[in-house]
Amino acid sequence: MRAALQRLLTVIFVVLAGTAVSGCASRPGPELLDTALEPVPGAKVVTVYVATTRDRNIPGSKAFGEAWGRQTGYAAYRISLPPDHKQGQIEWPNGKPDPAHNFVTVEQRPLDHAAFASTVARRGASGQPPKVWVFVHGFNTNFQEAVYRLAQMVGDSGTDTVPILFAWPSAGTVTGYVADKDAATYSRDALANLLTELAQEKTTGKITLIGHSMGGWLTAETLRQLRIAGRGKVLERLQVVLAAPDIDVDVFREQMAVVGRMDPPLTVLVSSDDLALRVSGRIAGARKRLGALDVDDPRVQELALQYDLRIIDISGLQASDEFKHDRFVGLAAIYPKLQEQQDSRPDLQLRRAGAFVFNAVGTTLSAPFSLAGQALTGE
């Protein structure tokens, strides 16, 4: 049965891939993280910290591969974004990396657990506890792609934050869907332990947890596990965003029934035209995926109110890939403005549960309609 599923997945993805072109001529290899190039004037350098259930199994490389590690590994990478960087994009090298026009690795450092813990607990530039971003990547993502993606998002946001990549051992292949689901399941304890340690660290500020695609499923499962384990104090420290989550809608209902309501409300970023989730739904027997919900559907509005969720349609954002699965990366550039609105205007929709449509031009939210007499916009 698994072999048949893999063959079906291969056929579907090959058909879709015939009309889709990756952002680079070929998949980036681990050699990108083994270089140590100097940034050029005008470049922006971002340090990405890594906690991973991947193993260092690549001969001649210090990068992490797709094999499952027996214990959590740690590292730090300094990534240079070129002066001509375009927001929402990763300027991959086509051949020899050029710091003037490509993302390049400036430095990479293996860390043990103690060094990782002490490093990420540094004070922010303002002297206040630093905000932390924990990014959980999605299906079919190799390690270097995940590192550079988080560097892009943090660089575009312009915020003083500590970015942590939680890298689970995705096989990094379009035919590895079942294997990736197993690898994500394998990583739940490690992610729960990482979040627990961060939440217990007094020198750490707000923790924003971002799970993309299958990483959204891993994130939701970890939240459920934390609640069952009685780690409610950890959940209280989290601000959770599920971006294009590859989760069956009914499974998600059961997960949220255990997790309960969160403050601030858990945010779900959706696009009804997400082709990757359309494929995932077909593989699952035409089961609807959470990240492909239509906010115009009254049932989606009810789901948001029942579990105190912010379900936000981001279809108005330009997609960075042909599958329309990575729209969320464009939010990083306007994150400071959204955060400023949230901090200065507690009456805004950003703090409220409901189903909304994101206006990319005005960086505002609006509700398609009101439900059961409850105004979702607050206007």
Image: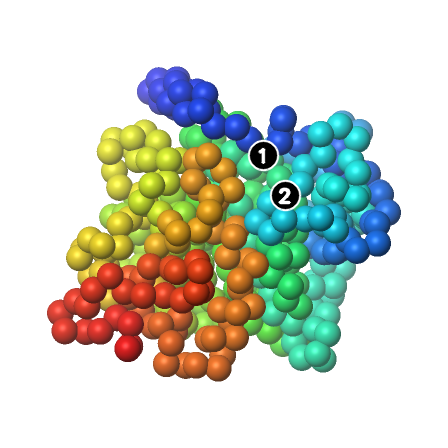
Amino acid type of the residue tagged 2 in the rendering: Ile
Residue 80 visible here: yes
> Disc number at residue 23?
1
Please name whichever residue, 258 or 40, is drawn nearer the observer in this view of the structure: 40
The C terminus lies in quadrant: bottom left
At a point 79% along the width and 38% down the height, the residue shown is 98
Q: Is residue 308 left or right of residue 73?
A: left
Instruction: State the image quarter where residue 282 is shown.
Output: top left
Task: Give whichever of discs 1 and 2 has the lower sequence position.
Answer: 1
- Whether residue 325 sits left or right of residue 194 in the image: it is left
Can you identify the residue that label 2 sits on?
Answer: 90
| Quarter of the image where the N terminus is located | top left
- Amino acid type for the residue under numbered disc 1: Gly
Residue 320: x %, y % from top left: 51, 42
Element under label 2?
loop
- Distance CA(mark 1)–CA(mark 2): 8 Å
Indicate the position of residue 176 as horizontal and vertical percent values.
48, 27
Q: Are marks 1 and 2 in contact (CB under 8 Å)?
A: yes
